Image (spheres, grey):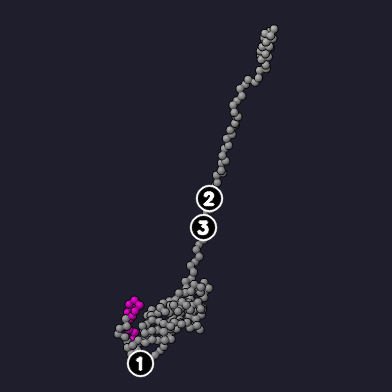
Amino acid sequence: MPGVVITLALCWGMKALIDLPSGNTEAQPYGDVLDFVRVKPKEEPVKKKKRPAKPETPEAPPPPPAMPQVSTDAPVLEKIATGRPSINPAINMDGLGFNLGNLQEGEYLPIVKVAPIYPERAVNRGIQGFCTVEYTVTREGTVKDVQVVESLCDSWLFQKPSINAAKRFRYQPKVVGGKTQEVKGVRNRFTYLIQGGDNG
């Protein structure tokens, strides 16, 4: 009897296994499937190069400024009666020195005169005029103690260039009794005129 029961139980169990519903037999894919989307890099817009502006036609250059003219007037000479005709001995210039050999009687005479530099400020302002300086001619023919005669100088702008120019003057010194002499109180007037200016 027990053998019959066991046999029936085995048969029933086998039948139950056979009748089990079949599951989803499709193979599941392994892992996750990723979709790749390629992103195109942003294309930078091409910058248009600016064409260089055409150079403007240059205007005609302005006429050159009027060139100032400076003149040096002859110094005021003291007239001295010598009782004999004046003689102008030949003077040789050697560098800054003078050949004073064979001195002869006579008054001092200008050998080198330098024109002053016209002040730029005076040119810009259109200032013209005169400036007189006074100085001493030395025994060597150089100039010292240069001063401006303020009452005879039209503008203070002319004072410094007039002094600087007078310092560079050179003279044949005055000779008395075979010896050179200093001469004080010599004056020279500088004229400052702008070319094309009103000289009236």
Residue at the image point whose x is 56% and y is 43% from the top: 44
Residue type for callout 1: Gly
The percent coordinates of residue 60 (x first, y second) are: 50, 62
Q: Kindly report the distance in space between the C-alpha atoms of the residues bearing marks 3 and 2.
A: 17 Å
Splitting the image into 4 quarters, where does residue 84 fall? Answer: bottom left
Residue highlighted by disc 1: 83
Tell me the quarter of the image containing the N terminus.
top right
Relative side of 109 to 2, left or right: left
Q: Is residue 65 magenta?
A: no
Give how far apart the Cα atoms at labels 1 and 2 are: 89 Å
Above or below: residue 78 compared with residue 30: below
Q: Secondary structure at mark 1?
A: loop
Determine the secondary structure under disc 3: loop
Magenta residues, as a range? 81-98
| Figure disc tally | 3
According to the picture, the residue beneath numbered tag 3 turns out to be 57
